[in-house]
Amino acid sequence: MRPLGLLPVDGATLRRADAADAPELLVLQRCCWVDEAVANDTLDIPALHETLDDVRAWLDVWATWCVRVDGRLIGAVRARQEDDSWEIGRLMVAPDLAGRGLGGWLLRLAEDQAPAEVESIVIFTGLQSARNIAIYEGAGFRRTVAPAPPGAVRLVKVRDPHRH
Ligand SMILES: CC(C)(COP(=O)(O)OP(=O)(O)OC[C@H]1O[C@@H](n2cnc3c(N)ncnc32)[C@H](O)[C@@H]1OP(=O)(O)O)[C@@H](O)C(=O)NCCC(=O)NCCS
């Protein structure tokens, strides 16, 4: 994996999210997941239906990182350990700033946070989300046939067993 390097957007700052970030996370995820709705031709996507309380609830159980410029939330990602894997999700970048490398940077950040004992890194996306799947495959993830929510595909990156 490439080293993390500097944030690719001028003036951007990174911080661990807390409950105070929930309102803006709700707005950003609802905005970002419209692309998923279009790509998969469905509105049946959890990120589009969550309430502020839902976002507050997942902030309690996921480690979440926020990127801001001049106070504006422009990107985020969350991750948590599930048994022997590290699950990454809710990778989002404001649409007007897409394509500048921030999504890839946030993905590497979340991977870097995986605990040492974790054997694989897991991420889900829509079955028809060709751009996301290309991004994840480009980052070394591979599609699996393991169970995934309806309409989703599970991508996995197995960690090097000699990394310790
Ligand atoms: C997915 C998302 C986070 C990507 O953010 P982004 O800032 O536009 O992504 P980047 O500019 O960092 O591009 C990521 C990588 O994918 C590559 N890439 C971009 N578009 C690609 C495409 N169509 N095919 C293949 N690779 C592509 C980029 O070259 C980059 O590679 P690099 O890291 O080696 O340079 C953002 O578009 C988003 O918020 N989408 C809506 C929400 C969503 O679907 N999230 C993921 C759900 S699982």
Image (cartoon, grey):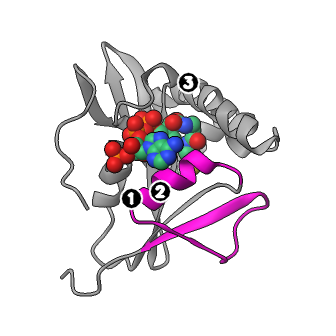
Q: Amino acid at mark 3?
A: Pro
Q: Are marks 2 and 1 in contact (CB under 8 Å)?
A: yes
Does residue 157 appear to the left or right of 148 in the view shown?
left
Between residue 51 and residue 135, name the one nearer to us: 135
The structure residue drawn at horizontal position 42% and vertical position 23%, both measured from the top left corner, is 97
Within 10 Å of disc 1 (Cα), the crowding (few <14, some 14-19, many 20+) is: some
Residue 100 image-quadrant placement: top left
Query: Disc 1 beta carbon < 8 A from ligand 1?
Result: yes
- Which residue is label 1 attached to? 139
Mark 2–mark 3 Cα distance, whole angstroms, equals 28 Å
Residue pictured at 59% horizontal, 44% vertical: 57
For the N terminus, which image quadrant?
Answer: bottom left
**From the viewer's perspective, is residue 130 above or below residue 41?**
below
Q: Report x, y in % for residue 85.
A: 46, 74
Bounds of the magenta segment: 128-157
The residue singled out by tag 2 in the image is 136
**Which label lies toward us, 3 or 1?**
1
Tell me the amino acid under the disc marked 2. Answer: Tyr
In three-dimensional space, the C-alpha distance between marks 3 and 1, rounded to whole angstroms, equals 30 Å
Residue 77 at least partly seen: no
Q: Is residue 148 magenta?
A: yes
- Between the residue at mark 2 and the residue at mark 1, the CA separation in whole angstroms equals 5 Å
Q: Mark 2 or 3 closer to N-term?
A: 3
- Residue type at mark 1? Ala
Q: Residue at x 21, y 49 (%)?
A: 4
Which numbered disc, 3 or 1, marks the residue that appears first in the sequence?
3
Disc 2 Cβ-to-ligand 1 distance below 8 Å: yes
Instruction: Name the residue that disc number 3 marks.
Output: 23
